Image (spheres, helix red, strand yellow):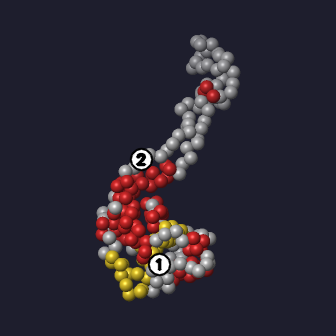
Amino acid sequence: MEVSVLNIKGQETGRKVALNDAIYAIEPNDHAIYLDVKLLMANQRQGTAKSKERSEVSGSTRKLGRQKGGGGARRGDINSPVLVGGGRVFGPKPRDYSFKLNKKVRQLARKSALAYKVQENALMVVEDFTFDAPKTKAMVEILNNLKVSDKKALFVLPGADKVVYLSARNIERVQVMPANALNTYKVLNADVMVVAEGALAVIEGNLTK
């Protein structure tokens, strides 16, 4: 599979790059995508939710009523879960929500997300670029040239580029990230992916080794 390489002015350079069919032309696996996104979301949870159970509520332990003959359900002290202000039954406790996911499944999920982008014609390849200094105006010009200014765009670069990152930081719905940090959620969350030519080799190296 080949795609045309554009320059930052949105014009075709006359060159084409071959996309690895083992990554961009596979049959997407929705379940692998689900598991990988679930893992990412779980890892972001703090897991600090906590409620007091019966033994932790502050209150008297005096038995409020007789065991039998009261005409209703038996209950003990004022900390009983059936009373307002009592403890909570099986409430949340601090816990770790993360879980293990095999490396091959995570790779399959990223390949599937990239394959979906190719199927939707939402993946563009541009020449490697950078700026002399951080300038939002220059980044806005690139978005207009590529005709993605009205979309949620993800720029994937060969490596970390602070100048490009700072240039895009204040633009709504635009994200910049290095290719080795690419994850399934970021790919799916973007309307269009703008991949720098040099980033293709990094992505392929990460997903085929």
Position of residue 145 measured from the top left corner of the image (x, y, whole percent): 51, 83
Position of residue 24 measured from the top left corner of the image (x, y, whole percent): 34, 68
The residue depicted at 37 percent of the width and 66 percent of the height is: 205
Which kind of residue does numbered mark 1 sit on?
A: Asp
Residue 122 visible (yes or no): no
The residue depicted at 49 percent of the width and 82 percent of the height is: 8
Q: Nearer the viewer, residue 75 or 194?
A: 194
Residue 21 visible (yes or no): yes
Position of residue 123 measured from the top left corner of the image (x, y, whole percent): 41, 73
In this view, 165 is above or below 45: below
Q: Nearer the viewer, residue 102 or 73?
A: 102
Q: CA distance from mark 1 to mark 2?
A: 36 Å
Q: Which mark is residue 145?
A: none
Q: Which mark is residue 128?
A: 1
The residue beneath circle 2 is 100
The residue depicted at 40 percent of the width and 52 percent of the height is: 35
The residue depicted at 41 percent of the width and 68 percent of the height is: 202
